[in-house]
Image (spheres, grey):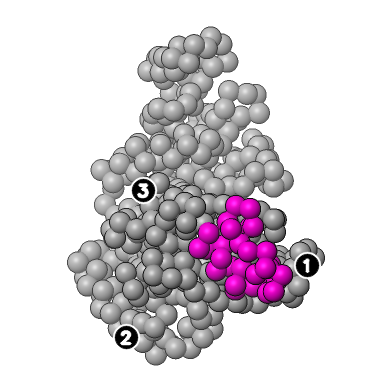
Amino acid sequence: MKATIITIGDEILIGQITDTNSGFIAKSLDKIGIQIHEMISISDDKSHILETFAKVQNEVDFVIITGGLGPTKDDLTKITFCDYFQDTLQRNSTVENHIVALFTKMNFNVSQVNRDQALLPSKAIVLQNQFGTAPGMWMTKEKTVFVSLPGVPYEMKAIVTNELVPKIVSEYKRPYILHKTILTYGQGESIVAERIEPWEDNLPGFVKLAYLPNPGRVRLRLTARGPNESILQTTINDLVEKLVEIIGDIIVGFEEDESIELVLRELLSQKGLTLSTAESCTGGKISEIITSISGSSNYFRGGIVSYATDTKVSLLGVKQSTIDAFSVVSTQVAEEMALGVQKVLRSDFAVATTGNAGPSKGDADASLGTVCVAIATPNGVFSEQFNFGQPRQKVIDRAVNKGLEMLLKEILKNY
């Protein structure tokens, strides 16, 4: 079964906001065996919406639309649905009661504009929106189901999770889609591809391999599709076992949701270990990644962004004599930063970064792109120096990934 995802909104087309909804919807549908055929972003224009609907009609099984369901006059989706399905708007008492209850709970008056959110195409099946006033709508024409969802991300996610996915699962027989992502660090995409070429050439036809490179790391995602889940799982397990024999030296974990922070969460939580960060050139990015997932408060003690040189001295206890002797961008300073934050925040591990991301040198004598990363452990501290070149964002991204890689390898190897 296939699906097309359509986002409606001029604000997306002009780059005013970034479309994050499509990615969430795609992952949610993929997990239940629905293949994503295409993603389309279109303007808040009635004729454009109708043309797009006609184009995808009967081409896919599901069309998932986000945006255009708000109370203002520029939100056209409901009216356009009526035109496309030859329907009329009708007040839905269940939805209206929900709207009134929602506003009453917040001690707000319910305006007529808000009440009119309960005007829906009469043929629509309502997908309840527990967090907002605009419900989702499910309508069928010929061989295609059209589902309209609000554009507000947290409202959309709740409807997809609690309403849309369960409805599809209960009403449609779907193929199985299994993924396995192997996380590798330290070698580039071309080197990894060369090492595993014979293995890749012998993949069965129902298994696909995708390379997902980022600065300093490559994720290898295996995807198997078919009617028999047991066969798919056995095949994936066998392939991964053979892959470990070939590149086990650079494999640092296996991800279901493709993120190193999830691997670290499992390791640190299982082993009862804690972590802190001291960041200069990465500006808090490592802490941001670690705290982006739930449960990080169980092991992450906190972070200090010691961007200025004097902050490294006053907050982290870096010796001025060390800076004078080796420069602020040095492995010696990185190690003192790591040990300092480990002591201040009382953590088992600490990651520290100091570098010259560019485009100007600032306080550092080191060349542009130089980054020093240190890891403090319960048994000591170690560090490495790198040069990630330019531009600035590339340096920062690679420094973040290198810090996480070094931490992960240390935990896997010794703890």
Q: Nearer the viewer, residue 414 or 235?
A: 414
Residue 7 at x, y percent in the picture: 57, 44
Q: Is residue 369 left or right of residue 161?
A: right
Distance in Å between CA atoms under marks 2 and 3: 34 Å
The amino acid at mark 2 is Glu
Dot 1: element: loop
Residue beneath disc 1? 361
The reply to whether callout 1 and callout 3 are in contact (CB within 8 Å) is no
Q: What residue is disc 3 on?
A: 298
| Residue found farthest to the right | 360
Q: Which residues are magenta?
A: 312-340
- The answer to which image quadrant residue 51 occupies is top right
Q: Is residue 51 above or below residue 369?
A: above
212 w.r.t. 63: above or below: below
Asked if the magenta segment contains residue 336, the reply would be yes
Residue 236 vs residue 315, the one in the foreground: 315
> Is there CB contact under 8 Å for labels 2 and 3?
no
| Comparing labels 2 and 1, the label whose residue is closer to the camera | 1
